[in-house]
Image (tube, helix red, strand yellow):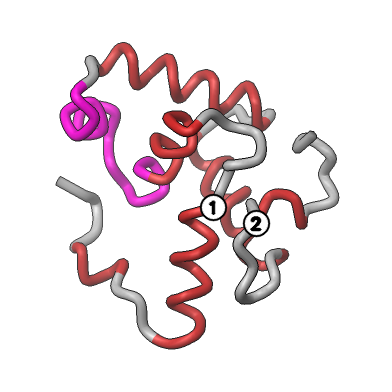
Amino acid sequence: MTALPPAAFAVTGAMGRHVTATMEHFGTSCLSDREAEVARLILRGHSSKVIARMLGNSPETVKVFRKRIHTKLGLASSAELFTLFLAALCAAPHGTTDDPLIHLSWGFVE
């Protein structure tokens, strides 16, 4: 169901907890709850078809969510979503429970 085995997302040590927390809160300041959920599933390597199945939606609905995510975050592709996540991961202080995007100085988060 995923591009990586579940063990790849196992929390190990401080860095694992940081990655997990960053992913859990990623986009929560500027995306709807469902958009943030879809973004997390994309970041975990799921395809639109698999995300649709997991959420009980059609693949077309998931494509709409993807477009909204890209528009709200100013992205052109899923590759840019991954790049943004990595930048947010580096910028967010360890232990924070805020959206890691607020720690970036790019200004797209209100």
Please tell me which residue is depicted at 44% across the width and 21% down the height of the picture: 65
Q: Reply above or below: 56 against 14.
A: above
Q: Main secondary structure of the magenta part?
A: helix
- C-alpha gap between disc 1 and disc 2: 6 Å
Asked which quadrant contains residue 75, the reply is top right
- Magenta residue check for 65: no
Asked which quadrant contains residue 63, the reply is top left
| Foreground of the two, 27 or 85 | 27
Considering the numbered disc 1 on the image, is that residue within a helix, a strand or a loop?
helix
Which mark is drawn over residue 98?
2
Q: In this figure, which residue is indicated by the disc labeled 1?
A: 25
Amino acid residing under circle 1: His
Please tell me which residue is depicted at 46% across the width and 75% down the height of the picture: 17
In the picture provided, is 91 more to the left or to the right than 18? right
Considering the numbered disc 2 on the image, is that residue within a helix, a strand or a loop?
loop
Badge 1 crowding class, 10 Å Cα cut-off, few under 14, some 14 to 19, many 20 or more, is: some
In the picture provided, is 64 more to the left or to the right than 6? right
x and y percent of residue 39 in the render? 45, 39
x and y percent of residue 45 in the render? 32, 47
Q: Earlier in the sequence, mark 1 or mark 2?
A: 1
x and y percent of residue 8 in the render? 28, 69
x and y percent of residue 72 in the render? 65, 25
What stretch of residues is rendered in magenta? 41-56
